[in-house]
């Protein structure tokens, strides 16, 4: 391994190797120095971890604090106006994705029962109904249609709203504000404004649920007297945001990727039993939640380097999931690959709470879409599809498609 690789200044994010592969500089860095120093745009130094083994070890090591991992929520070094962190961020009540034990454990355990494999299996038929109803709507529209707006976003939004007990009629508020929140170079003021609009709304909602609980996850949480309204609001914010933006982008970007691999798409149409493995492979290949942040609470050895106490560590899940040391021919989509072991749902104590739900939504979503629309084509050249390189969750902004519906289920 050479130590002569130039240290990157800022995070290399440009998708210069195509819409699905890691940026070239990231791949080069992973080969040369999978745990590499990094200079942030404000000039201070941190680390960038790109190798599969190193990422996995890091995520399993709680000495790397998540109190920098505002990952999907706000990214300190890309937010203009945000000062450089010199210590773990102050905690936002309820936002347990950015907490360490024991606070993280206390909040997460209140929710694990609601997201077990068994509970999610019970919801499977219901989720399939939601998908089918949305496909009915899609079939009524005159092509070309934007698959993001008409399918990929509504399906997970409808599902998470129903589970949490958030009225879907209020989606304008949370979809618009969470999108604003995820723009990378949004000013701090704009982000704070979007955050407070969302939390004001959710705080009223959970206050109401505490007074008159119903049959939904937020009501169940509100029944716990030891959780404050602020904690309920923070947890509701996390669940709502994590529950719709991620899956929506997987559905849309996944459809784009399949349309760009027509032979594999045809195989999937012919044999839907291939879907569970295909979904895992799409998760690996696309890694829509690419960048996570951690904070070293002490000096830690990782991949032959010493990460100094107090360092900010940037983790690239996309790079790790495309590491040839772990996956053969990693930049190739292969729906027959056994891709389990990918890191797209994270790893360790913060591993995605909603992963079973997301899997069910993706399987039902892709299965229904392919069955109902035997001919599905991009309505614009692939090179013109607007990629979400400006957002903290990757995907496509729009996916205009033409289709011919079968018209029956
Ligand atoms: C955590 C990805 C869907 C709720 C995470 C993490 C990743 C992730 C990478 C770990 C973050 C970290 O370690 O800092 C995804 C992807 C999804 C998805 C790619 C869709 C394909 C969902 C859904 C929910 C959800 C549907 C539903 C509520 C959460 C929560 C956490 C989390 C609450 C925080 C867990 C903790 O801190 O203990 N997700 N997620 N996610 N996800 Fe997901």
Image (tube, rainbow, N blue to C red):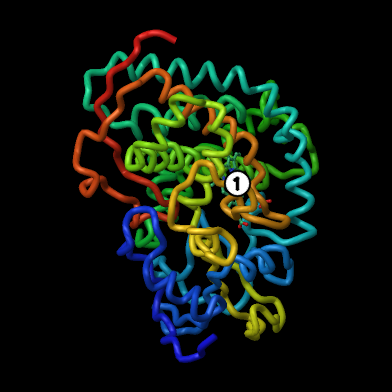
- Name the quadrant of the N terminus: bottom right
Residue 233 pos. (x, y %): 61, 43
Q: From where the camera sits, is residue 212 visible?
A: no
Query: In the current view of this chain or complex, which residue is farthest to the top?
Result: 408
Query: In the current view of this chain or complex, which residue is farthest to the bottom?
Result: 4
Q: Residue at x 35, y 21 (%)?
A: 374
Q: Residue at x 70, y 22 (%)?
A: 122
Label 1 within 8 A of ligand 1 by Cβ? no
Query: Is 30 rendered above or below residue 332?
Result: below
Q: Nearer the viewer, residue 244 or 53?
A: 53
- Name the quadrant of the C terminus: top left
Residue 27 pos. (x, y %): 44, 70
| Residue 219 location, quadrant | top right
Q: Nearer the viewer, residue 234 or 10?
A: 10
Which SS class for mark 1? loop
| Residue carrying label 1 | 338
Q: Nearer the viewer, residue 336 or 300?
A: 336
């Amino acid at each position: 391994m050479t130590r002569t690789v130039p240290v990157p200044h800022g995070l290399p994010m440009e998708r210069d190797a195509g819409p699905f592969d890691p940026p070239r500089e990231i791949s080069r860095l992973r080969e040369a120095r999978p745990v590499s120093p990094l200079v942030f745009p404000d000039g201070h130094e941190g680390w960038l971890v790109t190798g599969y083994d190193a990422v996995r070890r890091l995520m399993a090591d709680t000495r790397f604090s998540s109190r920098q991992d505002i990952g999907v929520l706000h990214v300190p070094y890309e937010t203009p106006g945000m000062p450089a962190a010199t210590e773990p961020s102050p905690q936002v009540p309820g936002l347990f994705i950015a907490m360490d034990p024991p606070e993280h454990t206390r909040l997460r355990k209140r929710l694990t029962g609601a997201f077990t494999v068994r509970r999610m299996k019970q919801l499977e038929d219901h989720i399939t109904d939601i998908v089918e109803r949305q496909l009915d709507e899609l079939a009524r529209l005159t092509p070309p249609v934007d698959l993001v707006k008409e399918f990929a976003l509504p399906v997970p939004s409808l599902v998470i709203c129903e589970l949490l007990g958030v009225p879907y009629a209020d989606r304008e508020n949370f979809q618009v504000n969470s999108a604003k929140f995820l723009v990378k170079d949004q000013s701090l003021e704009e982000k704070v404004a979007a955050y407070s609009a969302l939390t004001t709304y959710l705080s009223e909602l959970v206050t109401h649920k505490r007074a008159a609980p119903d049959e939904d996850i937020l009501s169940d949480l509100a029944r716990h007297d030891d959780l404050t309204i602020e904690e309920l609001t923070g947890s509701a914010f996390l669940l709502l945001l994590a529950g719709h933006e991620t899956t929506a982008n997987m559905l849309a970007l996944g459809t784009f990727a399949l349309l760009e691999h027509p032979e594999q798409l045809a195989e999937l149409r012919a044999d839907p039993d291939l879907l569970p493995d295909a979904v895992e492979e799409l998760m690996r290949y696309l890694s829509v939640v690419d960048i996570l942040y951690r904070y070293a609470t002490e000096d830690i050895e990782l991949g032959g380097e010493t990460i100094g106490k107090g360092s900010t560590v940037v983790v690239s899940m996309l790079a790790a999931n495309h590491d040839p040391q772990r996956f053969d021919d990693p930049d190739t989509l292969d729906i027959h690959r056994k891709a389990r072991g990918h890191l797209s749902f994270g790893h360790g104590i913060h591993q995605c709470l909603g992963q079973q739900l997301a899997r069910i939504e993706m399987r039902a979503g892709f299965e229904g879409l392919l069955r109902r629309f035997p001919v599905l084509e991009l309505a614009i050249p692939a090179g013109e599809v607007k990629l979400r390189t400006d957002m903290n969750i990757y995907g496509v902004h729009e996916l205009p498609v033409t289709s011919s519906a079968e018209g029956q289920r």
